[in-house]
Amino acid sequence: MIEVPVYPSGYPCKCNGNCDYSRAYERAGKPRFIDYESYVKKGFVPATNREKSILAYLKTTYCLKK
Ligand SMILES: [Zn+2]
């Protein structure tokens, strides 16, 4: 598990939902911890909508507004 670093606003960047990255984080349900290893494992197939949205979030390019 990895802890997702977030700002006091609850978002991983300073856009608070106004960029693709923070929107993807929102759609993933703003998880504070992600089982990163299993998502990046070769051949991983998301089984639920939540897993799908988390995978989509992990694939979103990191926003540069830190
Ligand atoms: Zn952003």
Image (cartoon, grey):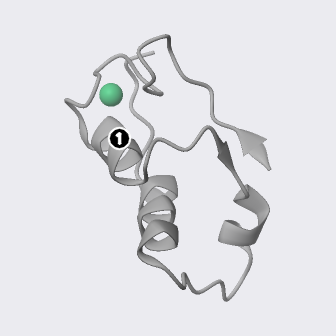
Ligand 1 image position (quadrant): top left
Residue shown at 54% from the left, 85% from the top: 47
Q: Which residue lies furthest to the left in this view?
A: 18
Out of 4 and 60, give the one closest to the viewer: 4
Out of 65 and 46, give the one closest to the viewer: 46
Where does residue 41 sit, x and y in percent of width and height? 74, 75
Where does residue 42 sit, x and y in percent of width and height? 72, 82
Q: Which amino acid does label 1 sit on?
A: Tyr
Asked if 35 appears above or below 21 in the picture, the reply is below
Residue shown at 35% from the left, 43% from the top: 26
Task: Tell me: is circle 1 under 8 Å from ligand 1.
Answer: yes
Where does residue 33 sit, x and y in percent of width and height? 68, 43
Residue under pointer 1: 21
Local packing at callout 1 (Cα closer than 10 Å; few below 14, some 14-19, many 20+) is: many
- How many numbered marks, from 0 up? 1
Where does residue 20 sit, x and y in percent of width and height? 26, 43
Q: Quadrant of the C terminus?
A: top left
For the residue labelled by badge 1, is the local secondary structure a helix, a strand or a loop? helix
Residue shown at 73% from the left, 58% from the top: 35
Residue shown at 71% from the left, 57% from the top: 36
